[in-house]
Amino acid sequence: MKYLAVVITLMLLSIGLMAQSRHQKRPAKFLAAGDTVKAITILNKKIAKFSDDADLYLYRGKIKLNRNDLGAAMVDFNTFCSLNGTCGETAYLKSWILYQQGNYKGAITQLSDVTRKQPSSTAYLYLGLSHLKVTNYGPAFGAFERSIELD
């Protein structure tokens, strides 16, 4: 499961690199070199200057997620959603963090919303797994079926 998270994060980061703001170019150089500490340090400075730039929080959150710093990533994703007015792709990342933290009921709530707005086989898979963890077998089966249909 951790491998899947890393793959998803790297895919999202690569997409983000293509559409990065001018504030993200310098941290991206360090990220490409594998220096996530330096990339986060630069992003911290950028955020101090441009605290209303939602994309900076999203970018930093993805790096923190890739480093398995789940709590800090969640804070950045929540800030992104607040500043942006909508969560978009971040809603799935937040639900995945809730699942990894063992907050299965929270993950179910978040994933139910995600699957209504942006159905994907992965979101339904984690919805099913979350239902299993809280012994909701009927909804888990339904989520797994939907995951297979979308795959």
Image (spheres, rainbow, N blue to C red):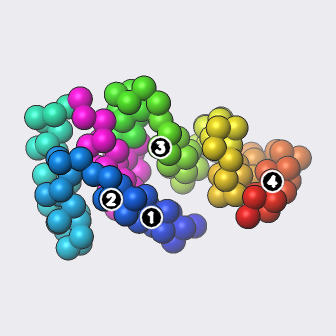
Distance from the alpha carbon under mark 4 to that under mark 2: 31 Å
Picture coordinates of residue 140 (x, y %)? 81, 50
Magenta part, dominant SS: helix
The region drawn magenta spans 52-75
Q: Amino acid at mark 3?
A: Thr
Tell me if residue 66 can be seen. Answer: no
Residue sitting nearer the eye, 84 or 61: 84
Q: Residue at x 50, y 45 (%)?
A: 89
Q: Is residue 30 above or below residue 114?
A: below
Distance from the alpha carbon under mark 4 to that under mark 3: 21 Å
Q: How many marks?
A: 4
Q: Which mark is residue 146?
A: 4
- Residue mark closest to the camera, 4 vs 2: 2
Sequence order check, earlier mark of 1 and 3: 1
Q: Is residue 64 left or right of residue 114?
A: left
Q: Which residue is mark 3?
A: 90
- Residue mark closest to the camera, 2 vs 1: 2
Q: Which residue is mark 2?
A: 18
